Amino acid sequence: MQTKRFFSGHRKLALRSLVVATALSVMPAAAAHASLISTSACDGAPLSQPFLKWGDTSPYKLVPGGDFETGAKGWTFSGGAQIVSGSEPFGVTGSVGRYSLYLPAGASAQSPYTCVDAAYPSFRFFDRNRGLLSTTLVQLVYKLPLLGPVDLPVGAALLNMTWGPSLPMLTLSAVPGLLGGGYAQVAVRFTALTGATQLDDVFIDPRMK
């Protein structure tokens, strides 16, 4: 059993390396290989422009439960993560909400899986720190055939004391899309590394750049 887990872990590690190493070369060619990678929104979710105020004209879809207004159904919490009162003040979902996600240091939260393909190159969210020099690790978790969940670190979000949008982060979805027959299921995982973090309104961009 230990040997089986050892090789399974090494296969997942190899896939992480493959995605990171090849995504930059695959993404520019994705539009030329539409027969291999779908470049359309794969679940018909409604789109909006939540970051237009900050010069980002791309259309986005809300990650399931990503506004935290309905109790974050389908999200997985650990380490004291919880829904709290207070929301980003910009009303990017159509109105100012009442709730957001709170992560004390060491806590993490993972969204439900959502459909992505090569047309989902980036995602963004709103955040603010609740402690001095707070940082949040951001990861993507892909559900792939045979291998199961494979997590990929995307980067760390350096937070401000007031609410604001994160920088765009790449989903690297082209490679998992190829491996998964054109589509992949991905979840977003947030982990508070230092200090406490508050997050709200998590969006994925479904348009091919």
Image (cartoon, helix red, strand yellow):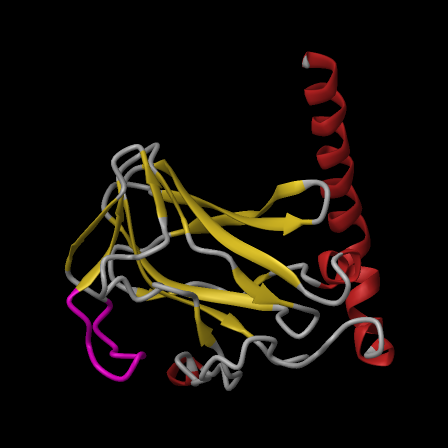
Q: Is residue 73 magenta?
A: no
Q: Is residue 159 above or below residue 151?
A: below
Q: Residue at x 31, y 79 (%)?
A: 92
Residue 112 position, x and y percent, is 44, 55
Q: Residue at x 43, y 85 (%)?
A: 48
Magenta-drawn segment? 88-98
Q: Is residue 92 magenta?
A: yes
Q: On the rendered structure, is 176 left or right of 62?
A: right
In the rendered image, is residue 209 in sight? no
In the rendered image, is residue 80 in sight? yes
Q: Is residue 100 above or below residue 208?
A: above
Q: On the rendered structure, is 17 left or right of 169?
A: right
Quadrant of residue 53 within the rendered picture: bottom left
> Magenta part mainly helix, strand or loop?
loop
In which quadrant will I find the C terminus? bottom right
Residue 206 position, x and y percent, is 58, 77
Quadrant of residue 51 within the rendered picture: bottom left
Quadrant of residue 181 within the rendered picture: bottom right
